[in-house]
Image (cartoon, rainbow, N blue to C red):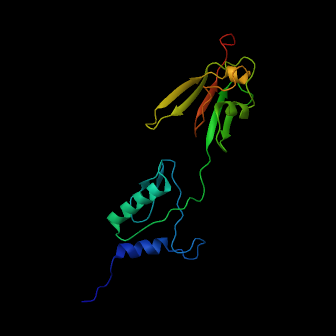
Amino acid sequence: VTPIAVNTKLEDLLTTVDSRAGTLGGLHLVVNVTPAGEIQLPGIESVCVQGLSLEEARQEIDAQYDAAIPGVQTTLVLVERAKRFIYVLGEVGQAGRFELQGPTTAMMAISMAGGWTPGSNLRQVVVFRRGDDWRMMATMIDLRGALYARRPVPADDIWMNDSDILLVPKTPIEQ
């Protein structure tokens, strides 16, 4: 008996991924993470990698490949990280979307938006943020003392995360 084909799933995977002329050497495939946090790989279902480290994502991918095509091992390389943005609204010099290029606090975000304008209520600045369960959360912070140099270390100044919305409202008199 001569087998005609052995482990055709593995051979199909190899022909899909075969790109030996690439710069990384060996077999490699470049994939993008979708906005839903998933990647699509040949031979298995889509894999959710949102919130996982590279090692955790590798273990998840290897586990799915082990169930579908035994013997496949992966190595993940992060080529480019998606840009991260915050949104600043309300009584600021220039409201809009701003790219996070490093750790950024609420006071830094106001500075990126051109500072506060006369009539802004710095005692009730609100940061809107999505939780792990995608529910919107609002946190009110008081930045007036720090921004007017009356408090050296503001307890309310918080770190901004990707997709946070910072709202500087009007004062009650302005309303």
Q: Residue at x 45, y 66 (%)?
A: 74
Report which quarter residue 60 is drawn in: bottom left
Q: Residue at x 71, y 26 (%)?
A: 92
Q: Position of residue 64 (x, y in %)?
A: 37, 61
Q: Residue at x 55, y 30 (%)?
A: 128
Relative to 169, is 58 on the left or the right? left
Relative to 120, is 141 on the left or the right? left
Report which quarter residue 19 is drawn in: bottom right
Question: Is the residue 23 above or below the residue 94 in the image?
Answer: below
Q: Residue furthest top?
A: 173
Relative to 121, is 69 on the left or the right? left
Q: Residue furthest left?
A: 1
Q: Where does the N terminus fall, quadrant-wise?
A: bottom left
Q: Residue furthest bottom?
A: 1
Q: Where does the C terminus fall, quadrant-wise?
A: top right
Q: Position of residue 98 (x, y in %)?
A: 67, 39
Q: Position of residue 103 (x, y in %)?
A: 64, 41
Q: Position of residue 58 (x, y in %)?
A: 45, 60
Q: Residue at x 66, y 27 (%)?
A: 153
Q: How many marks?
A: 0
Question: Is the residue 148 above or below the residue 52 in the image?
Answer: above
**Residue closer to the observer: 163 or 158:** 158
Report which quarter residue 91 is drawn in: top right
**Residue closer to the observer: 46 or 138:** 138
Relative to 134, is 104 on the left or the right? right
